[in-house]
Image: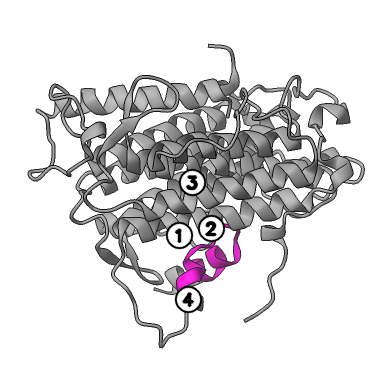
């Protein structure tokens, strides 16, 4: 048990320490039975906080940063996404995956792999990102025990894909890119917000 | 992750679930979910199950993560970006590549073990896992074993028990949350490892031209 307790402490200090959510909830708050909607909603909220905070942490004048520009000897960064493209790509993919769940239409032409080219500024791209998470919450709220295994057409082809996969895969996909953005931030001397020392509660 | 990878992953998932279901004799839930009429699976396609869906997600991250771990040469397995001394960077105290791998494997054990009732390995005393695991071979074995536990953990997950809670090291958590959290967590660190690989001139296997 000591091992588990020690692990609990250190894991909860790490980013993605989502279990802390429950720990910080008021003890008097009645516990509601978990639902598919609530579980996915929690995953999206955790991601949203870390991802949006990371996106906002990059200064405007470095928003188009790419590691390729550092010229690190022996590295291989040819053609990788800029920081801005990472954010646009994730937001656009969020729209694709979560629109399939809710049945909504994307708010604009989502463009190619790097999302809508028309979005240039940090403010525009972050608004696009936040809007994609708002959609994610609607998608999560739409999930029920009766429909999670129901399939909808994949946004990428003719396949039929279960709603629960689309809803949760978007979270995993975004965390892949979040991990890359963390490195882009550190390359610029910026400690990702989720990795900064947290105030003691 | 490029769009083509997203498409591929979704396509693989769709086909794999159908194949898997067929291989299992159409092991659909006894009482299938009721999808909306427009999203109903074709009669010839057995209904997906929560177990199959999460298992495939684990397989997806397992493939990318293990291949990325294996792509780092032995003599660079303890690489840290801090050693590059990039001007203006802040890599003070970040994990080495080896610690990224050990950390993810450790989290896999901590989150999946409550679903199976297995004990976590005794060497786990902190977020970076067993200190005695030093070599690339030892750490990758630890990693692969953690994913094997993941597959075991979701084997009996279904629409009925997915929202039931189980006791963990910190209160109770829904089974579905414990099952899927490690996938997202591993992708976070995979994204970091991708950058570590590229700093060493290695294109991540999943990003290479197929």
Q: What element carries label 1?
A: helix
Q: Name the residue under label 1.
A: A42
Vertically, is A2 above or below B104?
below
Q: Does the magenta stretch include residue A13?
A: yes
Q: Which of B127 and B205 is in front in this view?
A: B205
Of callouts 4 and 2, the N-terminal one: 4
Q: Where is residue B31 in the image (x, y as percent from the top left)?
A: 9, 45
Q: Where is residue B154 in the image (x, y as percent from the top left)?
A: 27, 46
Residue B153 appears anywhere in the view: yes
Circle on res. B184: 3
Residue under the image location 77 percent in, 47 percent down: A123
Between marks 3 and 2 in the image, the one whose residue lies nearer the viewer: 2
Q: Quadrant of residue A33?
A: bottom left
Q: Give the range drawn in magenta.
A: A7-22
Q: Which chain is mark 2 on?
A: A
**Quarter of the image containing the N terminus of chain A?**
bottom left
Left or right of B144: which side holds A93? right
Q: Which SS does the magenta portion mostly show?
A: helix
* C-alpha gap between disc 4 and disc 2: 14 Å
Q: How many labels does the image show?
A: 4
Of callouts 1 and 4, the N-terminal one: 4
Q: Name the residue under label 4.
A: A23
Q: Mark 2 points at which residue?
A: A46
* C-alpha gap between disc 4 and disc 3: 21 Å
């Amino acid at each position: 048990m000591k091992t588990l307790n020690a692990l609990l402490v250190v894991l909860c200090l790490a980013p993605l320490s989502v279990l802390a959510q429950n720990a910080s909830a008021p003890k008097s708050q009645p516990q509601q039975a978990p639902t598919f909607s609530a579980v996915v909603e929690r995953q999206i909220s955790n991601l949203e906080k870390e991802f949006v905070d990371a996106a906002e942490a990059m200064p405007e004048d470095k928003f188009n940063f790419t590691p390729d520009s550092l010229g690190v000897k022996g590295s291989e960064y040819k053609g990788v996404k800029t920081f801005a493209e990472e954010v646009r790509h994730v937001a656009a993919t969020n729209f694709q995956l979560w629109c399939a769940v809710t049945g909504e239409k994307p708010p604009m032409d989502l463009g190619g792999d790097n999302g809508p080219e028309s979005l240039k500024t940090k403010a525009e791209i972050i608004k696009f990102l936040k809007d994609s998470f708002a959609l994610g919450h609607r998608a999560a709220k739409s999930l029920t025990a009766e429909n999670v295994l129901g399939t909808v057409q994949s946004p990428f082809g003719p396949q039929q894909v279960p709603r629960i996969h689309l809803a949760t895969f978007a979270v995993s996909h975004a965390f892949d890119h979040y991990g890359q953005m963390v490195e882009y931030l550190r390359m610029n001397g910026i400690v990702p917000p989720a990795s900064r020392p947290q105030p003691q509660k | 992750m490029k769009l083509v990878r997203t498409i591929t992953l979704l396509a693989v998932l769709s086909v794999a679930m159908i194949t898997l279901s067929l291989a299992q004799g159409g092991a659909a839930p006894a009482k299938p979910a009721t999808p909306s009429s427009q999203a109903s699976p074709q009669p010839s396609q057995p209904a997906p199950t929560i177990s199959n869906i999460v298992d495939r997600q684990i397989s997806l991250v397992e493939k990318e993560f293990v291949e990325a771990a294996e792509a780092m040469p032995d003599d660079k397995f303890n690489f840290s970006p801090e050693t590059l001394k990039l001007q203006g960077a802040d890599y003070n105290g970040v994990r080495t590549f080896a610690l990224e791998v050990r950390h993810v494997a450790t989290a896999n054990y901590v989150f999946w073990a409550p679903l199976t009732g297995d004990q976590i390995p005794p060497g786990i005393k902190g977020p970076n896992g067993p200190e005695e695991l030093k070599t690339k071979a030892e750490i990758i074995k630890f990693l692969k074993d953690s994913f094997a536990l993941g597959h075991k953990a979701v084997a009996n997950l279904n629409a009925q028990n997915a929202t039931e809670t189980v006791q963990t090291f910190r209160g109770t958590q829904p089974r579905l949350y414990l099952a899927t959290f490690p996938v997202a967590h591993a992708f976070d660190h995979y994204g970091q490892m991708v950058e570590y690989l590229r700093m060493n001139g290695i294109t991540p296997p999943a990003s290479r031209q197929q």
